[in-house]
Image (tube, rainbow, N blue to C red):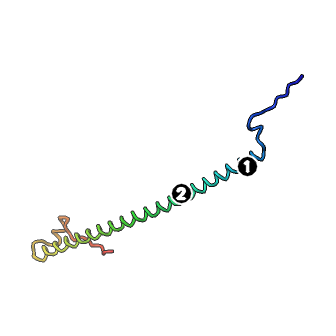
Amino acid sequence: MTDTYTDTTDAAVDDPATVIAEGLRRLAELRTFHEQALADLEAGKETGRQRVAEVQAEVDNDTARLNDIVIDAANEFNEESARLIDTGWATPKVLADRGLGAIRVPKKK
């Protein structure tokens, strides 16, 4: 007599419709997870762009302030140099030979 083996594991017992329904549910779940992750990524990118813009504005502000300080210092140096020349205590050549010639002053932005 031959014995017939019958597989009684869950996979063999499951109805194909149930397997398909479960697979579709899992796919929908994964799609939702993907869409949420994508939305979070885009939100993170936008937040990053805003932070970069804020930092760039701060850097630009500091650069403008420092540029004004450099221009003011150059103007003061040139005024003092001109005063020494006007009073006869120095000549432009002597100052230039000592590395103390007039400083070129850029225009304020």
Residue 54 point in image, percent of width and height: 40, 65
Mark 2 residue type: Leu
Q: Nearer the viewer, residue 96 or 49?
A: 49
Q: Nearer the viewer, residue 85 or 108?
A: 108
Mark 1 residue type: Ala
Residue at mark 2: 41
Q: Residue at x 38, y 67 (%)?
A: 57
Between the residue at mark 2 and the residue at mark 1, the CA separation in whole angstroms equals 30 Å
Q: Is residue 35 left or right of residue 104?
A: right
How many neighbours does mark 2 have within 10 angstroms: few (below 14), some (14-19), or many (20 or more)? few
Of all residues, the one furthest to the bottom in this rendering is 86
Residue 63 point in image, percent of width and height: 33, 66
Q: Nearer the viewer, residue 58 or 40?
A: 40
The quadrant of the rendering that contains the C terminus is bottom left
Q: Is residue 24 left or right of residue 100?
A: right
Q: Judging from the image, what secondary structure is the residue with disc 1 in?
A: helix
Q: Residue 38 appears in which quarter of the rendering?
A: bottom right
Q: Is residue 3 left or right of residue 58?
A: right
The quadrant of the rendering that contains the N terminus is top right
Residue 76 point in image, percent of width and height: 19, 72
Instruction: Judge depth for marks 2 and 1 and give the one in front.
Output: 1
Q: Is residue 76 above or below residue 17?
A: below
Q: Residue at x 85, y 25 (%)?
A: 3
Residue at mark 1: 21
How many neighbours does mark 1 have within 10 angstroms: few (below 14), some (14-19), or many (20 or more)? few
Of all residues, the one furthest to the top in this rendering is 1
Is disc 2 in contact with disc 1, using a CB cutoff of under 8 Å? Answer: no
Q: Judging from the image, what secondary structure is the residue with disc 2 in?
A: helix
Q: Residue 89 appears in which quarter of the rendering?
A: bottom left
